[in-house]
Image (tube, rainbow, N blue to C red):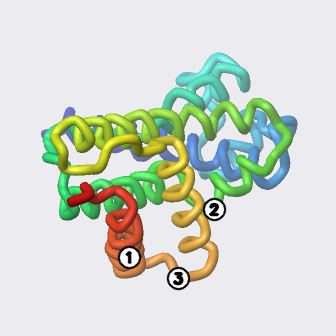
Amino acid sequence: MVKETKERQRERTDSKIMRATLEIMIAQGIGAVNIESVARRSGVAKTTIYRRYANTDDLIRHLTLSVAPSLDFSALEPSRESLCTVLRRIIDCFDEEFELKAIGVVLSSENTHLRSIAQGVIEPAAERFYDFLRRGMASGAFRGGLDAPFLFQTVLGSMLACKALSASSPDSHADWADNMAALLWASIRPTQ
């Protein structure tokens, strides 16, 4: 039990450090990120941060690796209902792991490092979404010839718009997923 508590505490501390690093990068640029500013923003002691990361570059490298979402749709049989489940998982994961507003800011940034962090989050989610669609096309649950990258871009753009235009609540996530699934279903359902 003590080990589990220490592990959870370490995870919470790491999360504070990563979130503060990302917030600084988004608000002030990558040049503003240093151990001292992360310590101030996160409330984590500099000594703790230095014990975990050799320097600012090491901290930023770790941020890039830590923000990739952990999505898995392989157990879902492709259907209209599972499409809605996929969309709920995507918006929930992005909202937890990497704020949707931050994605919008980062994607519009000219900073290549920030864009690579965003791609490290977006690409794994896109690949899992593509795989879900491929399995659906192969099984006949979805019509063939779907443009998976375009559909994912539509999903991502819609999520960003939903986040920007509505209050961030779990209900708005469910409503978005239901509405987006209905919209997509009209395009991907198998033709009779």
- Whether the residues at callouts 3 and 2 have beta carbons within 8 Å, the answer is no
Up/down of 167 relative to 138, above or below: below
Q: Which residue is mark 3?
A: 167
Instruction: Determine the residue positioned at 25% across, 55% down.
Output: 190
- Label 1 and label 2: CA atoms lie apart by 20 Å
- Is 116 left, or right, of 157 in this rendering? right
Looking at the rendered structure, the kind of residue marked 2 is Lys
Q: Earlier in the sequence, mark 3 or mark 1?
A: 3
- Label 3 and label 2: CA atoms lie apart by 12 Å
Of circles 1 and 2, the one toward us is 1
Element under label 2?
helix
Looking at the rendered structure, the kind of residue marked 3 is Ala
Residue 18 image offset from top left, x and y in percent: 57, 41
Element under label 1?
helix
Q: Which quadrant of the figure contains the C terminus?
A: bottom left
Q: Which quadrant of the figure contains the N terminus?
A: top left
Q: Earlier in the sequence, mark 1 or mark 2?
A: 2
Up/down of 107 relative to 130, above or below: below
> Residue 106 bears which disc, if any?
none
- Image quadrant in which you'd find residue 51: top right
What is the residue that sits farthest to the front in this orientation?
192
Looking at the rendered structure, the kind of residue marked 1 is Asn
Residue 171 image offset from top left, x and y in percent: 35, 81
Q: Residues within 10 Å of mark 3 (few under 14, many from 20)?
A: few
> Residue 101 bears which disc, if any?
2
Q: Which residue is mark 1?
A: 179
Up/down of 53 relative to 105, above or below: above
- Is 170 left, or right, of 74 in this rendering? right
- Is 96 left, or right, of 64 in this rendering? left
Q: In front here: 20 or 100?
A: 100
Q: In front here: 166 or 32?
A: 166
